[in-house]
Amino acid sequence: MKYIFILSFLIALGCKQQQNKIKNTKAAQIEITIKEEKENPIIKTQEDLIVVLKNPNNVIDAKALIENSGLIWSELVIDKVALKTVLIKVPIDKKDFWIDRLKKSNAFSSVEIKTRETINSIKSISENTYVKIRKSYCYSDCAVYDVVFFKNGKVIFNGIEHVINKGKHEFTISESKMKKIKGMFKKTLFDTYLESYVDKSLMDFPSTFITYNKKQIEIKLWKNVPLELVLAYQSIEDILFEKKLIQQ
């Protein structure tokens, strides 16, 4: 019995020493890895950007623009009918150049460095938007802008070209005015309308993009547009005229 006890003790002692040896070996490997990382730090060569497509129906052209510029189209971060948000990669030493270049490309409504806050902000804006209007360029002096009306009456207007006030302007309309706009759009049959009222022969005409209820409609030829939608759009324009943001 005595010998059995001694033998068991020796075996247990051997196991413990083996475990300590393994722990020491792992600790040494971790220390070597940390030392190597300090001596040879990983150099970041690319910056992640989050871009929001102005026209969510035009993913193919937006992707071609990115890839033809020598940049990396990584993945669709938000893929909804009326909202396409993409993760792209640009050279880190030229990130400022590309942020400015992409903003001026007229393909994206937002170009930001990727952070959790950026993505959450984009989602929040989308969820709280009631209606969004975007006016495109033409060959003349057409007003170019985009404007977002939020559910709580907050408005963000971004004047781009041929408007009275360029740049971003934020204001809040009264509850009664917001109620009127909501009433006008609820009278429409937006979900049943065509996604495009465009005559391709009218190249010089600007496009008006209306995003409402998770759907976007492009209008270039107003004569075929349902009257209810025309009146709803005019209720938006009336606010912009009143705020002296665009010319009548």
Image (cartoon, helix red, strand yellow):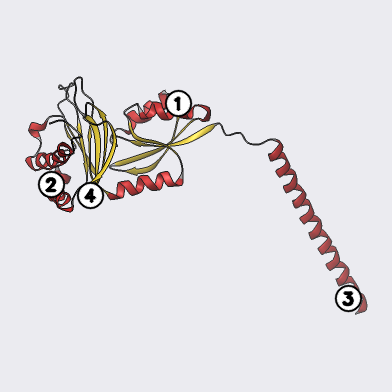
Badge 2 element: loop
174 or 100: which is nearer to us? 174
Badge 1 element: helix
Quarter holding the N terminus? bottom right
**Of tags 1 and 4, which is closer to the observer?**
4
Q: Amino acid at mark 1?
A: Phe
Marks 2 and 4 sit apart, C-alpha to C-alpha, by 22 Å
Residue labelled with disc 1: 97
Residue 47 location in percent, x, y?
A: 50, 34
The reply to whether callout 3 and callout 2 are in contact (CB within 8 Å) is no
Q: Is residue 88 found left or right of 135 in the rendered image?
A: right
Residue labelled with disc 4: 153
Around disc 3, counting alpha carbons within 10 Å, would you say few (fewer than 14), some (14 to 19), or many (20 or more)? few
Q: Amino acid at mark 2?
A: Leu
Residue labelled with disc 2: 189
Around disc 4, counting alpha carbons within 10 Å, would you say few (fewer than 14), some (14 to 19), or many (20 or more)? some
Q: Which mark is residue 5?
A: 3
Q: Amino acid at mark 3?
A: Phe
